[in-house]
Amino acid sequence: MRKLKLKKLKFIITILLATSVTMSCLNISALAASADSPTRNATVYGITYNYYSSVHNNSTSTWGYGHVYADDNVPTGYFGINARLYNSSGTLIKSSGMQYNGSSVNSKSLNSGSTTTKGTYYSQCQVSFYNGNGYHSYLSYSSPYVQRSLAPMSLEKSYEVNENGLTYGSGLYAESLEDSLDLIRAIGINGVEGYVYSKEINLELNTLDKVIDYINSGQQDYSVPVYAEDGTTIVDTFEVVTEDSSKKDRKSLK
């Protein structure tokens, strides 16, 4: 009888331990998530590039990525990525600015910058490829969303026109650069929501020489004004800051 009780006790302990391990695994899974967009590709100056966006989170932060890869190494400055992170309403939260490959490589991943605010997030990246005389630019698909809370999704893919004839709304409205709005909804460093000009937040370098000078300058962080919807009243400042993606854990590109 005692042996039966001991066996039963061991069996119960085994079940409890197994349950504990399972719950631990579930908790770990709940604290980390990632989602990738479908891949797009473009052939420019004889080179075929593949590009996509992704969004990742862990127990403390959420960040977006832009990814580019080619079959072979390409020269310095031949491609650039601007990684962006949006919240559930399509408001721009973080942007890396356009950053170019600083050496001869076949792939690069760029971090948008991270947020610690709970919510639902998406990413989308802009890419630029050298065409022998300048650059062709493209937009990736937007990524699926990841959540760090039960915040509702209310992604707005619509825009309005202000009294000055400028289009304004979520940057995620655009599915190509031709669709880009004049003013993209963004949150400034002081938490004020407004709009940034697409032409100001997208640093335009139209020659390879300018890109090489930009890479060598090391001055890759900058800030732009956040405006009210009229596009003239400044309400805050948006910082474009690059985080070193090599210091982040992420999955392999291929």
Image (spheres, rainbow, N blue to C red):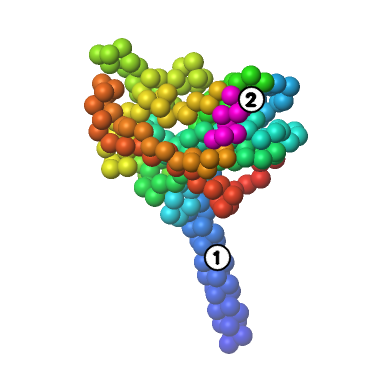
Q: Quadrant of residue 197?
A: top left
Measuring from the top left, give residue 64's x and y in whole percent. 50, 40
Measuring from the top left, give residue 35's x and y in whole percent. 54, 40
Q: Is residue 117 above or below residue 12?
A: above
- The magenta stretch is 207-214
Amino acid on which the number 2 mark rests in the picture: Tyr
Label drawn at residue 130: 2
Tell me which residue sits at (39%, 50%) in the image: 116
Cα separation, mark 2 vs mark 1, equals: 51 Å
Measuring from the top left, give residue 28's x and y in whole percent. 51, 57
Q: Is residue 158 above or below residue 37?
A: above
Secondary structure of residue under mark 2:
strand
Tell me which residue sits at (25%, 30%) in the image: 234
> Looking at the image, which is closer to me, 129 or 76?
76
Packing grade of label 2 (10 A; few <14, some 14-19, many >=20) is: many
What residue sits right under mark 1 in the picture?
21
**Residue at the extreme right:** 72
Magenta stretch contains residue 212? yes
> Looking at the image, which is closer to me, 29 or 64?
64
Q: Is residue 54 visible?
A: no
Measuring from the top left, give residue 47's x and y in whole percent. 72, 25
Tell me which residue sits at (51%, 51%) in the image: 32
Q: Quadrant of residue 42?
A: top right
> Looking at the image, which is closer to me, 130 or 41?
130
Label drawn at residue 35: none
